[in-house]
Amino acid sequence: MTTKFRTDVGVDKIKDYLMSRIDTSNPVEVEKVGRYLKHIEMYRRMERTVKKEGVSVRTKNGSQVFVKSHPLLGEMNKVNASIINIERSIEFITDDDKPKFTVNDLV
């Protein structure tokens, strides 16, 4: 028996994480995070629809009846590619960019 492994994380948690890893004074980077989150929400809505309706749909055209893949599958691939591209373009702050504090700074 396999256990369900939940891979989706709340959008708020993703936002908090990303905002902590970018320069929030840079409006371009903040906009990228916003677009990233919107794309994740779109992808999840499409995923729910496909899960509800199935990965294949039955189409009737006159006397012909055929089965084809759900139209949203292609759109999901496009949105997923956009998510990856936005993620790649985000300039994350590295540990080297963060200020280094020592115990003496507290005194």
Image (cartoon, rainbow, N blue to C red):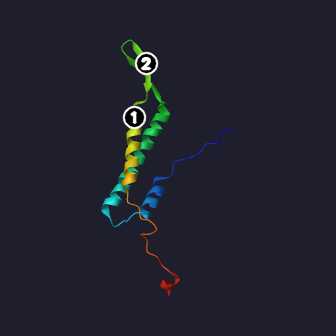
As drawn, the label of residue 8 is none
- Where residue 44 appears, x then y in whole percent? 45, 43
Amino acid marked by disc 2? Phe
Q: In this view, does 28 lie to the left or right of 49?
A: left
Q: Residue furthest right?
A: 1
On screen, residue 60 above or below 6: above
Disc 2 designates what residue? Answer: 66
On screen, residue 31 above or below 4: below
Q: Residue at x 35, y 55 (%)?
A: 32
Disc 1 designates what residue? Answer: 74
Residue toward you, 100 or 65? 100
Query: What is the number of callouts on the image?
Result: 2
Local SS, label 2? strand
Where is the N terminus found, in terms of image quarters? top right
Q: Which residue is drawn at 47% across and 39% down?
A: 48
Q: Which of marks 1 and 2 precedes in the sequence?
A: 2
- Where residue 79 appears, x then y in whole percent? 38, 42
- Where residue 39 appears, x then y in whole percent? 39, 47
Amino acid marked by disc 1? Gly
Q: Which residue is drawn at 43% across and 71% down?
A: 98
Q: Residue furthest top?
A: 63
Q: Residue furthest bottom?
A: 107
The residues bearing labels 2 and 1 have C-alpha atoms spaced at a distance of: 18 Å
Local SS, label 1? helix
Q: Nearer the viewer, mark 2 or mark 1?
A: 1
